[in-house]
Amino acid sequence: MRQGKILLAQQAVDVATTATGITRLDDGREVSSDVVQWLPPVSGTVFGVALNDTGQRAAWNSRFYDAPYKTPPKTPVLFVKPANTHTGHNTAVALPEDGSPIQSGGALGVVIGQRARHITAENAGQVIAGYTIVNELSLPEDSVYRPAIKAKCRDGFCPIGPLVTPAAAITNPHGLEVRTYVNGELSGIANTHDFLRPIGELIAFISSFITLNPGDLIICGPAAPRIDLAAGDTVAIEIDGLGRLENHIVASPFATTGETA
Amino acid sequence: MKRARIHWQGQAYDVTVGDDNRVTLPDGRTLAETEVQWLPPASGTIFALGLNYADHAAELAFKAPTEPLVFIKAPNTLTGHRQVSVRPDNVEYMHYEAELVVVIGKTARNVKREDAMAYVGGYTVCNDYAVRDFLENYYRPNLRVKSRDTLTPIGPWIVDAADVADPGNLTLRTYVNGELRQQGSTRDLIFDIPYLIEYLSGFMTLSPGDMIATGTPEGLADVKPGDEVIVEVEQVGRLVNHIVSEADYEATLSVSAQEQQA
């Protein structure tokens, strides 16, 4: 059974979706998954891991030896997607005020199921509750030297869901295809077997100095290929066995382009 | 008014704090500062500023930035007043950073500098410890430097914004084992509070309870297990913290886990 959250009568309520695609509330009532307002299925801290796929790593490699980097990353490159970025399936995400494009970031999300600190890579599976889809939206990055707050922390820049699939249902999380669709057209394919560091290593590293809690989410990548998105686009991320996360890109409500008062 | 969150006899409470640091529970009972466990006084997104005092930027041999250097800390790193912070074993340099923290009071999006102070709910103090051994030139300062468990004491309380007449002219001080080690004034902030609120709310929504740690002045030094580190911001608060070694901390945790099982 996959778990999710929807907004019902102004309240966040849990839902579960069966293998045949029927979504029900806890009390057994069926809801139409097309019309419900989906919320992120998790509510903990969301950690991202940058440059964790071989494609992205190769793209940046020639610059790693230049200033200011001087040497390639020695440890996983982490970031936080704060609460204002979290949004659910089928929601609208606004472009920056100046209308400049944003980029898709289809990625596997690992949901933590129990409190975890100093977990070894070998034991990491024990703390994973399940997996979900994340679209780690970003402005294009021309540097990874300073924290990417402006690029990655805009409102709605972290769609998650629709559902969390239990870990037991995914035999090999390192062999999942991640497909990006823009306006229904397949625009990019990546695969979780291209992770530079597997999930267990990431959990071991993070939990060596951060206590992870149930409901925390680790975006493990891949974020490649990133695809430019414009107002009016519908972007969907599909991951084998996890479903499809779709969002709508809209102009900023604060747009400063065009006529001025 | 000073407001805090404490843990007492198995339960968390929102409390008010008097001038003698006694806390008043919602039912009116009062408790001494040392009778309660102090929790972080807010729980939103934690923004922190790097290199936001010119003297500190120079101390680290950096040019002062032309745009705020903002990073985000995850909630795991927060701890309260009179708690311990863990110095990892086998590191060369871990330093304190006394900072004034702005706590957002109402939802802010696209707020102009001249209106920004109306969005401040109050102020608190943090000690934004950093372990410099773990600095790398990727998303610097990274989470291993700045978001470690226990390494951001914050509190003890939030002082209402109305009670601080001029947050742009407050003295910050750090004492290690009673000795004054760091001193500066918020008048030397490169990017002041209105600027930071305009900057952040210009591309994201700030919500009540979000915290902006505004940076630290010069005067950094290594701290060791056993040290008592006090950071204070004039008119806001005085935050006490003790450094423990990783080995001692892990031993305490395993003892308390055994006690819970017993």
Image (tube, coloured by chain):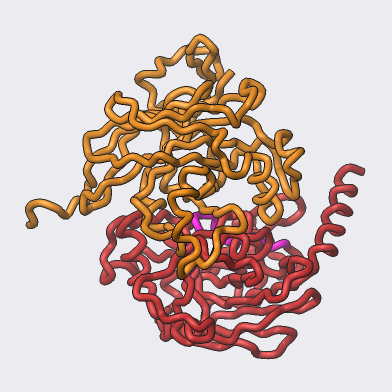
Say whether residue B52 is left or right of residue B176: left
Q: Which chain is red?
A: B
Outermost residue, front direction?
A: A62
How many callouts does the rendering have? 0
Residue at 57 percent across and 28 percent down: it is: A175
The C terminus of chain B sits in image quarter:
top right
Q: Position of residue B24 (x, y in %)?
A: 64, 63
Q: Position of residue B87 (x, y in %)?
A: 74, 69
Residue at 61 percent across and 23 percent down: it is: A170
Outermost residue, top direction?
A: A20
In this rendered view, identify the residue nearer to me: B179 or A176: A176
Q: Report which quarter residue B30 is drawn in.
A: bottom right
Q: Report which quarter residue B245 is drawn in.
A: bottom right
In this rendered view, identify the residue nearer to me: A41 or A229: A229
- For the magenta stretch, what is the residue range? B37-49
Q: Does residue A138 lie above or below B164 as drawn?
A: above
Q: Position of residue B59 (x, y in %)?
A: 53, 86
Residue at 70 percent across and 78 percent down: it is: B229
Residue B42 among magenta residues? yes
- Whether residue B198 appears in this view of the structure is yes
Q: Does residue B205 lie above or below A197 as drawn?
A: below
- Whether residue B32 appears in this view of the structure is no
In this rendered view, identify the residue nearer to me: A32 or B106: A32
In this rendered view, identify the residue nearer to me: B252 or B14: B252
Q: Position of residue B206 (x, y in %)?
A: 39, 56
Say whether residue B157 is left or right of residue B170: right
Which color was chain A given?
Answer: orange
Residue A241 among magenta residues? no
